[in-house]
Image (cartoon, helix red, strand yellow):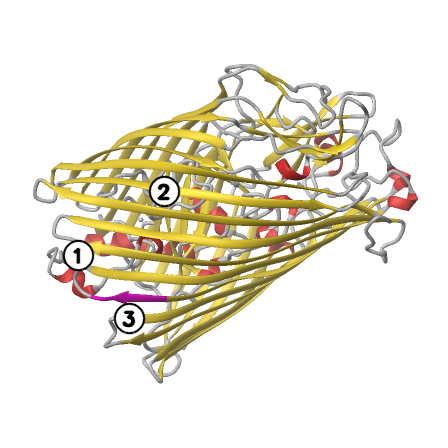
Amino acid sequence: MLVAGMLSFALPSAHAASASAPQPAAAGVSSPRAAAGKKKVKNLTAVQVIAQELTLTRIPMNSAFSASVIGPSAIRFSSPMLSVQSLLERTPSINVRTPAANSVRTNITFRAFSSGQFSETFDGVSINDPFNGGTTNSASTRNNIPLTLNDIDSVNIYRGINNPAVTSYNSLGGTIAFQPRDPSSKPSASVSMGGGSFGTWFYGLTGNTGEIGGVRNLVSITHNSSNGWQDNSGNRNTNVYYAGELPYDNANGTLYAYVIYNENRGFTPHTVPLPLIQQYGYSYGWPLNWTNSYNKDHGGTYILGDRMWINDELSFNIRAYARRVNYQRISYGNPDYAQSATQPYLLPNQSTDPSTAYHTYLYTTQQLGVMPHFTLSLPDNEVKFGADYSHTKLHSAEYWYGSRSMPLTTGLNDAWDEHDSRDLGSFFVQDEISLLDDTLHITPGVKYMFERTSDFDNVGFYYPISGSVSDKEHYTSPTIGVNWRPMEHLSLYAAWGKTAKFPGIAAYYNNVGLSNAAGQTVVVPLHVSPEFVRDLEAGVRYEQHGFQGALNLYRENFANTFIQSTNQVTGISTTSNGGSSRYEGAELDLQDSLKTRFGGFSIYGNLAENKAYFTSDFTVANSSGVAATAGQDVHSGQPLAGVPKHLANLGIGWKWQGWRVNVSEHYSGSQYVNEYNAGVPSAETIPSYAVTNLTVRDTVHIGDGMLKDVKLALYVDNVLDRHYYTFGYGDFMSDNTPFVRAIYEEPRAYFASATVDF
């Protein structure tokens, strides 16, 4: 495993969250002094300790909202092929596709919401693309990897429209809050290396300096290279992580810094028609001389903060942050294999003739922001308030040419050359009111969000004229949650809220260079409204003697659903509002732990039913206002694509002396796929599937000297060798025969690693 043994074990701190949830830094800071006079410390029993070491998810009993926590053990025992998003899949209502090594082309659904319709944060800072919403694979930045397992210690998962102290700008389905690894007060180091299937090799180096001049430092570097399981889809990834802390004022305050730098290079795994996979085998990928896309991406997240306990009543956490993405793709489509009667499939990157056989795609963003948060601790209230503001610039462009070495000249060979800016800001206040001897908690809150966006497009193949479109939007998002513990081991909760998602940049550039009724080329003002969601949910939780269980029901009513369609003639993608829809379901989460003479055991299981369907009739039209393709008519009651109705997980852990074993299975029910151009569901479906993974690790203790222990690990992914795919869409052959194209997931694979701890 790429980071096996490298993570110090500690319970979590507060165009294209044990009973009490750990709180992310975004929710404010806690001082040991401040906590000391308010609540009694409850010692952990042996069973609870085992549960925290083995259980991969935990249920926060006191939360007024649906939530889960993934602890460090899930990260320590993860396969080298596991992405940060795939780590989330063991919790209710999350489904992930990762069709290539190192997270390339990863996408995720959360309570049936797609990537970009929920927020993901690192130390409270949003890692969603400000212009297109998603985190990985947003705007076709296929190997942009903002986080790896090397960078995180735990994850808080908040389902639904949650308290404003943790949400960000896209929190329709919920918020996924990644918690950073922190440096240790004692020096340590580890070296890890390994390899396995698909020509995979990896190594990792981690060092904790301990305190030097009062400063604590953690530096970690990991590298993974793999040929991938689809032919011609290899890539390599390098991740550098730094965390530093400088306590001051007798440790009442701490200056801290986090740095993530990630670089990835490699080929895109493309969708392949299922008939070709049936003909040539599971690993079939397009020959490189037919079509290929080579991606280069490097980017980072940089956070500098100051958290301070002022007195028993007031503390703060102020961050300044910067984020950058620099993505480039050079693609090739051989005109000799264009779609025809003898080659009936449309190739990825299909060129029209030799003069457009190659193309370059550029996507670069720079973001600067500041985030002050404050916590006011009163006898029966904890009030949190704060703000966030960021300014981001985007340059996106695409160029076509007849050779790989090409000029990048606006007005000569550009499809588009776009320069955008977006200001995002928010203010929030939230109060947690404690009543009835601390058994009843009421959590009202409100967040005000605003955005200002400007888009400018130069002349290009898609734009006969240059032009700019700008707009500003604002929204007030109220929420309230209630948690009541009528008895020691039982809690009841309910929550309500509403929020919105601002339009992505596609809604702006769509309006440049359109034709009016008189045939004139014009720029049209923005006409797409923000997506809007109302959420209502209720649940019950129970815990005793190591057992935890939770059941909740939810309903989210969704208006102004964004629909993206593609004009087959021009290739331009457009965004429109596609009516209303409803997301509703139930989530059951159970886990238990047990200490026996044969070691410690833990088991977790969860089951989710997520239904997402349209509640109005509408028709998708392309950028010319004409019906685009078959399957574009949408009717009330029609299910959304990409939403498996049933999801389930089962995991078993065992600990005995130095041995650790974990077995997990993820099940996903069938789901509809979108029609390729219209962006709405077709009649085709992705079949259900179940995948089993196994991890075995032994820790050999050497002594108390410089060399402490050696960890040897074996990972078996997809133990039963299921052949399945999680992403696909409907398409048509040259004779208009429908078919499905897909990217298959990882087959059975074996990996081994050795980690030496110093």
Say what secondary structure mark 3 lies in.
strand
Q: Residue at x 47, y 42 (%)?
A: 692
Q: Position of residue 579 (x, y in %)?
A: 53, 21
Mark 3 surroundings within 10 Å by alpha-carbon count, few (fewer than 14), some (14 through 19), many (20 or more): some
CB under 8 Å between discs 1 and 2: no
Quadrant including the C terminus: bottom left
Quadrant for residue 447, please give it: top left
Q: Mark 2 belongs to which amino acid?
A: Lys
Q: Which quadrant holds residue 404?
A: bottom right
Compare marks 2 and 3 and give the one earlier in the sequence: 3
Picture layout, residue 208 above or below residue 576: below
Q: Is residue 600 visible?
A: no
The answer for how far apart the CA atoms under marks 2 and 3 are is 27 Å
**Looking at the picture, which amino acid does disc 1 mark?**
Leu
SS at mark 1 in the image: loop
Judge from the rendering whether residue 678 lies leftward or rightward of residue 315; answer left or right. Answer: right
Q: Secondary structure at mark 2?
A: strand
The residue singled out by tag 1 in the image is 44
* Residue topped by disc 2: 447
What secondary structure predominates along the stretch shown in magenta?
strand
Q: Which mark is residue 253?
A: 3
Report the residue that reaches farthest toward the bottom: 213
Looking at marks 1 and 2 on the same chain, the residue that comes earlier in the sequence is marked by 1
Distance between the Cα atoms at labels 3 and 1? 28 Å
- Quarter where residue 666 is shown: top left
Q: Is residue 570 left or right of residue 373?
A: right
- Please name whichever residue, 528 or 399, is drawn nearer the observer in this view of the structure: 528
Give percent across and percent down for residue 591. 29, 42
Where does the magenta region start and end?
306-310
The one nearer the camera, 146 or 376, is 376
Q: Nearer the viewer, residue 713 or 300?
A: 300
Residue 328: mark = none
